[in-house]
Each structure stands twice: as C-alpha cells, then as structure tokens.
Amino acid sequence: MKVTNVSDAEYFHKVVDCQYACPAHTPVPEYIRLIAAQRYTDAYMINWESNVFPGVLGRTCDRPCEPACRRGRVEDEPVAICRLKRVAADNKGDISALMPIIPKKKNGKRIALIGAGPAALTVARDLMPLGYSVDLYDDQRAGGGFMRSQIPAFRLPESVLNEEVDRILDMGVLTHFNHYVDSLKAVLDKDYDAVFVGSGAPRGRDLDIPGRQAAAANIHIGIDWLSSVAFEHIETIGKRVIVLGGGNTAMDCCRTARRLGGDEVKVVVRSPFAEMKASPWEKEDAQHEGIPILDNHVPKEFVLEDGRLVAMAFDEVEAVYDAAGRRNLVSTGQAPVIVPCDDVLIAIGQENSFPWIERTIDIEFGKWDMPVVDEVTFQSSNPKVFFGGDAAFGPQNVITAVAHGHQAAISIDLFCQGESVTKRPPPGVTLVSQKMGIHEWSYDSEVAADVRYHVPQAELEKSLSNRKLEVELGFDAATAFHEAQRCLNCDAQTVFTEKLCIECDACVDICPTDCLSIVVNDVDEAELRHKLKMPAKNTEQAIYVSADLATGRAMIKDEDMCLHCGLCAERCPTAAWDMQKFYYTVSKAGQGV
Amino acid sequence: MSYIRPVFRHPDLPRNALGFTRKDYEGAISTLCAGCGHDSISAAIVQACFELALPPHKVAKLSGIGCSSKTPTYFLGNSHGFNSVHGRMPSVATGANLANRELIYIGVSGDGDTASIGMGQFTHVVRRNLNMMYVVENNGCYGLTKGQDSATADIGSASKKGEPNHFEPIDLASVALQLGATFVARSFSGDRAQLVPLIKAAISHRGFAFIDVISPCVTFNNNPKSTKGYEHVREHLAATGTVDFVPFKEEISTEYEQGESKEVALHDGSVVHLHKADPELDITSRRSALRLIKDYKAKDQILTGLLYMDENSQDLHEILGTSKTPLRDLAAAELCPGQKVLDKLNESWR
C-alpha cells in the first residue's frame, strides 16, 4: 500500500471522528478539554466561532458527532458531546469583549438575507465583521426561523435562543420582521450585491386519505401546529391525540400535545420502531412521558361520527425486505386497527416550496422543482443568488444549515470582491507535539473507564403541566468533568517518524487495543489489513502505513480502535512515535487564500 | 502516563480453548526502560501461554534479581510467582517442583543472575533436568546497576561507556548443552515469530528447557559497538530454521519438503517441527549443536532457533522415581508413615 501522506490535513481530520462527522467541523476534543478545565468561556467561543449557536445546539443538535464518536467503538456509548456543549453555554462568562469588532465604515456592499434561520444568521455573523451591510427579511416576528417556530420551548428555552440570535442581530443587521418576501425579483431589483436565500423547507406534507377533508377541523399539519403553539395562537388540544409520523417533528408534536391537555397521546408510524427517523434519545424522551409508539401501522382513513373525527383506522403491516435490501410494508391481512382520537397531528415530512421565486430571473430549477445549487459554493445559476440551509438541498438540521451559511458567506465575500467563488481558502491546521517530559503530556492521556452519564431531567409531573419548563436540566460542573474525561482526545494524533524506529516492538506490545503492527507492506489493502496483529476490519477507518523500516517491514496502524492513550509514544525509546495535537478549523469568509 | 494502562481492549480479541483472551495472561504494566527487549519477551510469553491455553493458576513464575527478574510481574498476573534471592532461582524452582510436580514452571533470569552470581545454581539445575522452562534475558550488561559488562559480553563489545570488554564470554547455550540440558534454543527478543513457537515447545518439553534470548538493553548497551544491540544482532542473525509447534490436539497441516525438516515428538503427543535452514544441523545431537554454534560464531554470526532436543528426556521426578502424586497433596500419614514402617525399612538394609 502507498505510504500514508500525513501532511494531507484530511488524514488526521478523519481520525478526529466527531469533528469529521460534524457538518461544521467543530473542534470537539479541544472544547471538551476546556470544559473539563472549567474554562467554559473559552469552550463556548470555540463553538461560537464554528457553529454560531452553541446554546441552541447544546440542547437540540442532531449530533452526527455522537454516532461517529470513537468511544462508541471501544465501549457501549459515545461521549455526551452535545450535552457537554450545553455546559459551556450555560456556564460561560461575559463574552461581549470577545465579539468581533464591527467596522463603522462599511465596505459599500449590500447583502439581502431571505429567512432568519440558522443559515442566514450564520451568513450575517460571518459578513458583518467584514464591513458588509446586511438586510434580513423574515415573515415571523423574531429571528431564529425553525429554531423558534418548530423546536418546543421545553427543549429550547426562548431566552437561550434570543441570546444567540440577538448577538448576531446586534452587530447591526437591518431586520425586516413580519415581512413575507413574495417576490425574489423585487428583492433583486433593490440592487443588492448578493442575495442569500435561507427560507427553509416550510411546507408540511399532508396525508390524502378518506375523511381528510370532512375532519379537517381536527387535523393539523405538525410543523404549522408547532409554530402556532410557539407563537401562542394555539393553547389546547383534545384529550386523545394521534401523531402520525416517526421523525423528530413527530416527537416534538406528541410531547407538546401532552403538555396542552392531551392525556392519551399516541404516535403511530408506518415503519418498524428501529427504522424510525427520530433520534433514539427523542424516542426515549417521548416514551418516558407516557407516549406509546405504535409501529408498523399504515393510516387507512379518518373515521367520523356525526361529522366529527372520532378515530383513525390503520392497516397493520410487516416490513419485508427484498434481495437488494429494499423495504416493503406488506399488510398482515388482519382487520383494520381502530384508534379513537379527538385530534390528529400529521408529521410525516416537510418539503421545499418556492412560489415566490419567479422562474424568469435566471435561477434554474431542477429535480423536484428545487433550485440548482452548487454543493461547494452554494451559488445558484444566477451568480448573485446563493442558497443555504433547508432551502438549498431539502430538509436537514440546524448544524447543516450553519455549515452551509459559512460556505455561502465565503462565496458571497469572494463574489463581492470580484474573485472566483471556486477559489476556496484552505482550512487552518496546526500540529504540535504534546510532550512535556518523560511520561508527561500536555493533555490528560489517562483513559477514564466511566460509562456515559445521564443528564438529569425535571420532574415529569411538573414538566407536563408547563409547556415552557425545560425538561433537561443539564450536567452540573462535577458530572460535566467526569463526562468530559471520557473523551479519548482523538485530536492528540500519533505521529510516526520512520528513521527513528529501531523496531523494538515496545509500541506494538504496549498498545492496549492492538492497533499497531510491524509487518511487510502489501500492495493489496485487504491483504495488508488482514495480516495485522488484529485484522483491521472496519474499512471506514483508515490504516496508517509508514515507509519501509530497516528490516524491510513497515509500521502499520489501524486507526479504528486507537485510544490515543499515548502509551506507544511513552514506550518508544527513540521518540519515533510522538503525540501531537492536531487543530483543524474550517476556512472562514475574509480569511484570504 | 505509562503506569496507567487503559481498561479497554480490542473488542474482537480472539479466545483460546479456555475462553480466555490475551488480556487474561497480561501482568502489571512494565516499569522497565522504554524499548527494553525484556518487555518483548514478556509479550512473547503472554502470547505463547495464550496460544497453549494454559490455565493461569497452573503456572508458577520464578526469578532471581535484576531487570530480567522483575519481568514476571509484567506477564501472567493470575499465576503464582516467586521473586527469589539473586542467582538462587534454580534452588527455589527445584524445591517448588519437587513439592508440586503438577505446575508448569517458568523461570526467568538474566545474564548476571545466571552467568555470574547464579552460575553454580544454574549448572546444577541443568544437570538435574528439572522440568521447567528457563529463559535467560541476555543483554550482555548489568542494566540495573548502570550497564557494567556482564559475563556474556563478547570480547571487543563496548557498551555505552565505550570501553571494550576484554574477557572471554560465557556462552550459556553451550554450557547448557555440555551439562546435559534436554532442550536448548537461542533467540532474539526482536524476532517474535521465532520466539513464540520456541517458548511453546519449551513449556511443553518434559525436562529442562533452556532458551538464551538476546535482549538489547536500550539504555546501556544498544550502541553501534555493542554486539547485543538491535542493529548488530539483526545484521548478524542466522537461524537453524523455523520452528512450528503443533499441539497434540491439532493435525499437522503444513507441508514440508523432504530432507529439510525434522519432527520431534513430545511426551504429550505434541510435535515440534523444525524446518531446517542449515542441513548440517542434527537437533538430536549435542555435538552437532555445539559445533554449529562455534562455526557460526567464527563467521561472526549469531545462530538462533532450536539447537538441541532430547526426545527421550527423563526429568528429575522420573530419575528419582518420586511419587506421582504431588508431595503437597499427600497427607501427614502418607508422608510420615510412622515407626513401624521406618523399622521395616531399616531392617531391609541390614
């Protein structure tokens, strides 16, 4: 196999599984160490630079980092990365002095942002310090987009959202709230230098089955209903509620219904429980609040009595998989299952909708009537118009929207400065030895054996009676420290220098997880992976291959199971192995090439 | 920090016939210098015991004093251990073995512990063909007292201090061969593929199994002028051949070329298979082994691998005709049958 090129920043980046999995590539291990050191403000600022909404994300993130976490490969559960982030947000000090300075003298470029969700706010955050004038348009009465209208207050207190949204607006963004943009052409006609569309995926999918029209008064589209609750247009719901759908919106709907008077709330989902789209922890939280989840039930019709909704009929199905693994829901042939109800919430997905974008302004629309957007630059076929967040490629999540916002801001800046938007600035990378002395590293290399700590929750009875009472209480400082110590410090990279190695096997012998082997290299990767001390079966994880050593063999490291404990480097008599901290930051608007 | 070893191991670690993984054969974390050859030998012993599926509680580790003699702490943490007086491990091993013949005895010593202070003890345990494996971790210097030349240092070899050694070295493998050891091998700590099967064969051999393992001292004797440093040993290494140890329960699956291989059966039905690199070698002949050691030394090469093995080895218990039941299992009445029996015995000699 070819010798691994560790000077390619992406090699070590991929080793930091959490950071690599994060759409915004937040330097997770670095801020976790800062939390352990009770340096909450510093931890918060690393997050704020990278993901803009640490307080929001520390409560509501989809956490793609956690399934990726290395810890989950060596034991049962990953580090509670998301909830540690919240600890930084909850305990930080005054950060006003750390905010970027907004130039009084503007650079003369005017940008319009359509939508005030996480993507557009990120663009504003990145462009304001560069001297841009930013106009923000949104039909809601305050900023935050879906973070405000869709995420219930018992998961995300309004004060937390306001703080992080206002921090951006206070940079001098000119806001136009309660302003529905009904024509992109009209916006373009105002001579903006660039326009960013971050209008989300605002349309909830409907369910067209018998009885839908007749029972319309008691059937609600999930996201619209959540929004009405958030803006206090709706305060009650019937006693018996059915929530249709298996995603996170369904979980928010059922838990909100429980707080608005729904005593018997049930989630009914077509797919098997294990295949539901909702995050496992959200399903757990719903079940904890006494909400049963009926899986394998396909809605058949709304049942009415005297013109009023009284129940729903479902067809019980079984998931059958064909040879290609495709799922088919096959009816069991039993009589329909009748579930009595007073109200139904439909949370079976959401869609994009651009009735307000004229098809005459050079914006090309492609499949599913979605605008054609470049995946790297976020530019549309009209060079002045950029898309991001759910508006770009369909519904995703907050952290993805933030990542889009950063990249779109880079493009907008390049575009406004007359540069090519494809000339992307490189990421910031540093690699520094952590050696302080014999057996001493500047990171805490000891691997804690603790299992994942649970976040305490408010009393069930109390939280069910108050829609705004936050359910999760967050870790206290002591628990946060112990949870932070579970982090394996994957950014403390094992860096190997061939010419120093005397092939004494000390590293191979000491490695607790048998990651290291000194074997003859092989042209075939599969063959090489197989002949290691422990075969490297997880092909999603790289193997490091050194140049040939004195005996003609090579040092091979399977990155999969490495605990980053530093023992290889400690037992190395010649310092051929060293632990070096790898710090990777995504490129930013205005940083230059 | 290196005195803290994480609890996690690779989740797919293989299990042996007893259901144990390598972890079950580990010991405490080593406190020897980083890169010490001795740690490699400990790891080889762990691997061999794991592969042999030895019940850890059926093994006793014995040692004297020195860096080498510290190592039994670093392997087989669930086995019995005795860290004895300097150079006196053979006496303790003899006593233990006579009291309980059912344990597997692993003795670990060094060149100082064996070739200097313990030389007298060593020669007699060889002569008696005590059933044990005796490993010398041979680094040619006294590492624990700052690297003075030991009795196995070659003439002209210089340690870190730079002063060449003037005295004739003791070749422990040759000494063992001359004194009647029934299994003699030499190996190198940096050659795991050779060392593990040798240890497995040595443990399975009935009688005194001696392995002289060259084990570089990275701190005091791993410099260019030393003949026991990693570089020198690797450059001057020659092997009698490759050894396969085939346990009794497994069939021999490897095909060997005629005339170049030799099989030696062990008392328990296991087979040691030597794939010979030098057709001159006859591993059932002491003279052949002694001559080859000298011949290779004359060529400035270090001959490693299995050197000699006696298929018909009779260990100390067999020679003495001791009780098949371990002494420790005999009750007072059996060990001390009383005046009547003594009188009868004395009578028989009148």
Image (cartoon, rainbow, N blue to C red):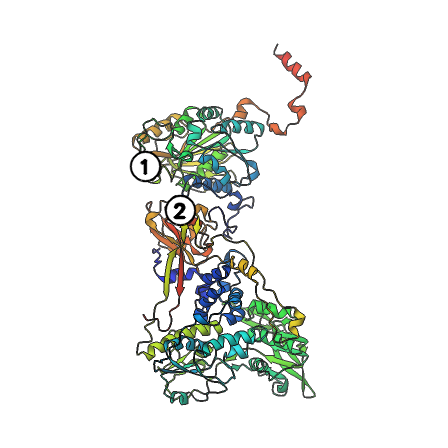
Residue B56, percent across and down? Answer: 55, 39
The residue indicated by pointer 2 is: A572
Looking at the rendered structure, the kind of residue marked 1 is His
Q: Quadrant of residue A21?
A: bottom left
Q: CA distance from mark 1 to mark 2?
A: 24 Å
Quadrant where the N terminus of chain A sits is bottom left
**Residue at the spot of label 1:** B236
The answer to whether one can see residue A228 in this image is: yes
Which chain contains the residue that carries disc 1? Answer: B
Identity, as a three-letter code, of the amino acid under mark 2: Cys
Q: From the top left corner, tell me how far across and down residue A494 is, in percent.
A: 40, 54
The image quadrant of residue A229 is bottom right
Q: Viewer-proximal residue, B197 or A577? A: A577
Q: Nearer the viewer, mark 1 or mark 2?
A: 2
Nearest the viewer among B288 and A458 is: A458
Tell me the SS state at disc 1.
loop
Quadrant in which the C terminus of chain A appears: bottom left
Residue A515 placement, left or right of A90:
left
Task: Please tell me how crowded label 2 is: few (under 14), some (14-19), or many (20+) other residues with Cα within 10 Å.
Answer: many
Outermost top residue: B350
Residue pictured at 53% horizontal, 73% vertical: A160
Q: Position of residue B256 (x, y in %)?
A: 40, 39
Q: Are marks 1 and 2 in contact (CB under 8 Å)?
A: no
Q: Chain of mark 2?
A: A
* Closest to the observer, B236 or A185: A185
Is B285 displayed left or right of B57 in the figure? left
Q: Residues within 10 Å of mark 1 (few under 14, many from 20)?
A: some
